[in-house]
Each structure stands twice: as C-alpha cells, then as structure tokens.
Amino acid sequence: MLNCGAWTLSYLAIALLAASPAGAKDAFTTTGDIGRFAIPAAGAALALFTDDREGLKQFFTSGAATLGVTYGLKYTVNETRPDGGAYSFPSGHTSSAFLGSAYIHHRYGWRWGIPAELAAAAVAYSRVKANRHHWHDVLASAGIAHLSAYLLVDRRDTNVVLMPMVSGPRRTWGIQAAMRF
C-alpha cells in the first residue's frame, strides 16, 4: 500500500500531465484548466507538508465522493453544453477545483480557505466564459464539493465558519458567517 507521500506525489504527477493547455481558447481558460488540478494538489500538499495524515485521508475520501457524484450525475443527466457538446451538468473542472478549496477551507480554516475559494471561483467562471458550462452547472459542482467536505472532513480551525447560503422565494445567494470569540 502506498504511503501518504506517495499518494500525494502520484496525484501531483497526474495533475501535471493532465493540465495540458492544448486547445484552450485563451489564457484565462488555460488558467482554469490548470486550476482544476492545482487547487486540489495544493490541498493534498498542505496536508502532506503539515504532516496531517488524517487530513490527507479525509482529502482523498472527500475527493472520491465529490468526483463520484459529479461524474455519476454527468453521465446520468447528459445535459447539452452551451457550445452544443454533451455532458454539461455538473462541471468536472469546477468540482475538482472546489474539492480542493472546500477541503482547504473546511480543514484549515478561512485564512487558507478564502484564497483557495477565490481561485476555485475563477475556475468556475472560466468554464462559463469559455462557453463550456451554464451557471447552474458550476454552482451545482461547488455545492457538491462543499457538501462532501462538510460531511467528510473534520475542522482544525473552529473559530470562524463561512458557509454558502441560498434562501427565500427570490433565491437570495450569499455567505453566512459565524465567529467564536
């Protein structure tokens, strides 16, 4: 069985090989293609370099759940992409980016999480801008990743909690915050 370091190095190697910018329309789309792998790799690297073996196990568990649900839905729903292609819902790029950011945010707190969440949001936006996904595709993907992290990843920083929120008949979106003093 591979140890935690070997799992992380394997993931990083796959990420680097798969992050080819071939066929990308512009630099922002290419950045989104790379962010799809770089953000989860950063989460795994953070666990590895802080010697957080339990966190690394939780990263892989949450990642497997996130990607399993994403690709299960993708091939079950088979929604048409804005550019006419198949398998739009939900976005694999966005799920992957948010699995990394949600893990970092949930495990290590808001100081590490906010920059990761912003990077993942940029990946999501790049998918919509590239005309590969609808907004609901990327929002569902972010939700899947966050739900997975919420259910499968234990917190280390419990002083500040930031959670996405949807409420009301007019579909109000926002962020709910709680802080312990």
Image (tube, grey):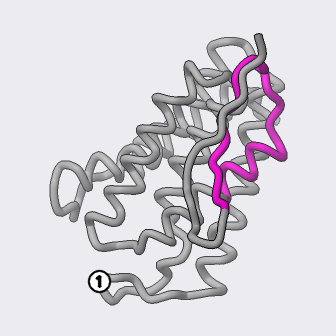
Task: Classify 141 as above or below 9.
Answer: below
Residue at 67% x, 59% y is: 144
Residue nearest the observer in this picture, 29 or 150 = 150
10 Å neighbourhood of mark 1: few (<14), some, or many (≥20)? Answer: few
Task: Classify 99 as above or below 180.
Answer: below
| Residue 64 shown in magenta | no
Q: Amino acid at mark 1?
A: Asp
Residue 117: image x %, image y %?
50, 38
Q: In which quadrant will I find the N terminus?
A: top right
Q: In which quadrant will I find the C terminus?
A: top right
User: Can you identify the residue that label 1 sits on?
Assistant: 83
Task: Classify 52 as above or below 13.
Answer: above
Residue at 71% x, 67% y is: 69
Residue 86: image x %, image y %?
44, 86
* Boundaries of the magenta span: 144-167
Tell which residue pokes out farthest to the front in this image: 169
Tell which residue pokes out farthest to the left in this image: 26
Task: Classify 122 as above or below 4.
Answer: below
Residue nearest the observer in this picture, 154 or 20 = 154
Residue 97: image x %, image y %?
51, 47
At numbered mark 1, what does the secondary structure look like: helix, strand or loop? loop
Q: Looking at the image, how many numbered discs can be counted on the residues? A: 1
Q: Quadrant of residue 160?
A: top right
| Residue 155 shown in magenta | yes
Left/right placement of residue 78 relative to residue 155 reads: left
